[in-house]
Amino acid sequence: MLRTIDEAIQYIEEKKIERKKKLEDLNVYVCVGTGCAAKGSLKVYEALKKIFKENNVNVNLQKLDDNEERVRKTGCCGRCSSGPWVIVMPYGYFYSEVKPEDVKEIYEETILKGKPVERLLFTDPATGERVERLEDAKFYKAQSFYIMEDIGKCECDSIDDYMGRGGYLSFIKVLKEGNPDWVVKTIKDSGLRGRGGAGFPTGVKWEITKNSKGDRKFVVCNGDEGDPGAFMNRTLLERDPHAVLEGMLIAAYTIGAQKGYAYIRAEYPVAVEMFRKAIEDAKRLGLVGENILGTGFSFDIEIKEGAGAFVCGEETALLASIEGKRGVPRPRPPYPAQVGLWGYPTLINNVETYANVPKIIRDGAENYRKRGVPNSPGTKMFSVTGPVRLTGIIEVEFGTTLRQIVYDICGGLTDDNEFKAVQIGGPSGACLSEAFLDLPLDYDSLKSAGAMVGSGGIVVLSKKACMVEVARFFLDFTKRESCGKCIPCREGLMQSYRILERFTQGKGTYEDLENLEFLAGLIKTASACGLGQTAPNPILSTLRLFRDEYIAHIEGICPSGMCTAFKKYVINPELCKGCGLCARSCPQSAISGERGKPYVIDQEKCAKCGICVEKCKFKAIEIR
Amino acid sequence: MKLKRNFAKVEEILKKHGYRKDNLIKILLDVQKEYRYLPEDVINYIGVALDISPAKIYGVATFYAQFSLKPKGKYTILVCDGTACHMAGSTSLIGAIKEELNIGPGEVTEDLMFSLDQVGCLGACALAPVMVINEEVYGNLTPEKVKEILRNLKEREMENA
Ligand SMILES: Cc1cc2nc3c(=O)[nH]c(=O)nc-3n(C[C@H](O)[C@H](O)[C@H](O)COP(=O)(O)O)c2cc1C
Ligand code: SF4
Ligand code: SF4
Ligand code: SF4
Ligand code: FES
Ligand code: FES
């Protein structure tokens, strides 16, 4: 338990020395983020522990007596599709796709001899060469790690390790200065904008909440991340929970809150667990609780689990949900900064927004602004998925282009795919075509392109993706997630969905196209909350940039071949040997024929299941 | 015969959350973990204990996707249908499960062993398409892999039976 500011500073100095030593010494880091864990990284972790335990490691003729402890857990390294990752310090070797069977070789070559295991080294898709250290790969150089600095070399579940990275010094500095106005000014000068989507200036929000009158005040962290296709908040909470917690502590001190809530969705059990541990450890050291470091400032924090409703990410709905109610938005103003939880002033920010705060205090507003562009300073984490060579979490400065992200960082599209579009900003975001590849990504330029940063999900779409289906998919999502309070959103989204569904089933008409456009505009202007106001974006952006695909659907073709309704299974009589295997396996009894002669498919009966294609050994069944 | 439920477990959960109304969602999540769904009599019990009308609790329970008023399987299969997974072919996984277990989304097998639900993003999009069975995440799936996983689980159950 740290009782004074000086005690805390001294403790941190000790941890810094320990951490420096740790990185110069032999230590193995295993990524246990969700991506790597799903690919078996925990088994690798156990195997490494076991081999360390069973053997007396002699490194530089020094016998290690704390063998097992040298295998450490680290959070997501960003490249989840190539996991599980193992990093061996002090060499910095980055091993990808490690299996428990590989552990013996890592032990014998790297641990005992200090040599890399060539076959496990990561292959840089840009050059096709193996790189010894991640820092040498092109995708790494093209990024700008700031929130994710110390990638692969930080322990996600250790407060001491966080302190060894200088963690909590910003909070201590703020406590020491004792000047909330200075904090507000610093955040304002930094130009930090909320990472939750709308990009509202964080300093301004803090100032309003600080100046609001109330007997009690609250700080809330929005970790709902209901966007399908986005996982940076999850990643951040899992890999660096203390950074988020420290940001919340600074915010609480600044606005004068005594209590905080972290709203994390129940679908993210690991993130919940990590954050819970972070709070407990901070409590144990006296950084959370009563009379923190003897300054008289008290702050307690609680985790609230969400239960799967996208609209709960909307701030007023989220507050209702924290109160234990249905997550239904209410009109703003009054803003939560004035009337929030149980009627008291409440500051609500996104996970990544909070994680930026300790760094801004550490580096100063001036230095912070060196990254990014004037109107959007700093970096942004994006989650990139789709048919690119490397998928996962990236961090880039604002102003980086889509081309840099898709080609330099993610290695371009995988072999049999061709670029068509990116979908950016979640279900309320937009699809951007090839013409936008050189658009610098920041709040303002995306807005002018009819898109938005949103929470930062980027889904790369190839020529195989049907843009009408993409729009249908998002509408299916938003219509389900609409809270139903206002008619334009509830009914409008339903009707728009029905029209889009008609298109994907080959029944769309030109009149539908007009109605769709009309409805989209109406929902956008007449809905009460952000969900309805942005839900038509996928329709509007695809109608604008991919109108020809809608028209093709009306004319009876799905150009990408994705919409099943347009597919036709046909037997090529030239290739058919008349074996009859397909007819026997067709669940619809749609295939008939005579042995030895070409078989035929009855299009009326065919359910387009594709089973017959798999069965035919002569590749005689074609999809047209 | 009407099953008589022992409310000791519910009482324990209520106690853990300090009988606080604002903890309703957490309480329901814990109850669901225990019973694999929200039984009617438990909802009524909670209503009385927290002094919330059962209608309000139903309102909450039906609002959030996580809750179910119908029993779930011993193995709850969640197939992700988020953007990344949908584009990577999550629908074909549903087809594979249907073939293997004969259940569709929102259904449970007769022996209450498996239930299937389609859910929004699970935050493991880099491994799309993804499914989760009782908190274990499976990524980069194909219909064949799904069938194999299910067969292994069935076998394990047979051995334990
Ligand atoms: C439908 C809807 C969903 C939202 N989901 C999220 C979310 O998952 N996470 C988040 O931080 N903000 C979300 N927001 C934005 C929040 O309402 C709010 O603006 C944000 O949390 C403020 O934090 P920031 O200023 O740090 O961005 C959502 C907004 C809407 C309208
Ligand atoms: S716009 Fe949609 S989600 Fe928002 S309040 Fe209206 S109905 Fe609910
Ligand atoms: S399985 Fe192939 S070769 Fe045999 S009858 Fe069917 S289409 Fe012809
Ligand atoms: S696609 Fe399916 S339903 Fe159609 S002919 Fe082939 S097996 Fe029969
Ligand atoms: S989870 Fe290991 S790299 Fe993302
Ligand atoms: S879209 Fe399936 S895990 Fe995110």
Image (tube, helix red, strand yellow):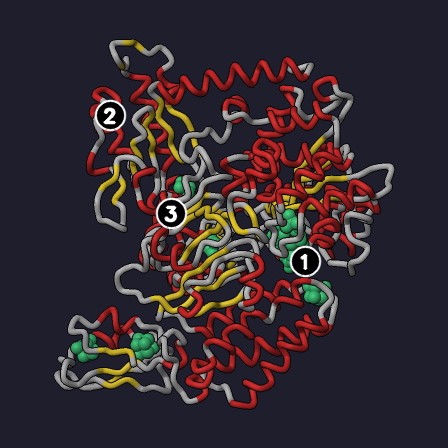
Choose mark 3 or mark 1, whichever is in front: 3
Is residue A209 among the parts visible in the rendering?
yes
Residue B143 x/y as whole percent: 34, 59
Residue A463 x/y as whole percent: 35, 70
Residue drawn at (71%, 25%), measured in percent from left and top?
A: A177
* Left or right of residue A184, residue B149 in this image: left
Q: How crowded is the residue under tag 2: few (<14 C-alpha within 10 Å), some, or many (20+)? A: some
- Amino acid type, residue under disc 3 in the picture: Ala
Badge 2 vs badge 3, beta-carbon distance below 8 Å: no
Based on the displayed image, in which of its 4 quarters is residue A422 positioned? bottom left
Name the one closer to the observer, A156 or A573.
A156
Choose mark 2 or mark 3, whichever is in front: 3
Based on the displayed image, in which of its 4 quarters is residue A77 positioned? top left
- Amino acid type, residue under disc 1 in the picture: Thr
Residue A577 x/y as whole percent: 13, 80
Name the one closer to the observer, A448 or B70.
A448
Q: Which mark is residue B62?
A: 1
Q: How crowded is the residue under tag 3: few (<14 C-alpha within 10 Å), some, or many (20+)? A: some
**Disc 1 and disc 2: Cα gap in Å?**
54 Å
Q: Which mark is residue A110?
A: 2
Quadrant occupied by the C terminus of chain B:
top left
Q: Chain of mark 3?
A: A
Mark 3 lies on a secondary structure that is loop
Q: Which mark is residue A527?
A: none
Above or below, A578 against B57 in this view is below
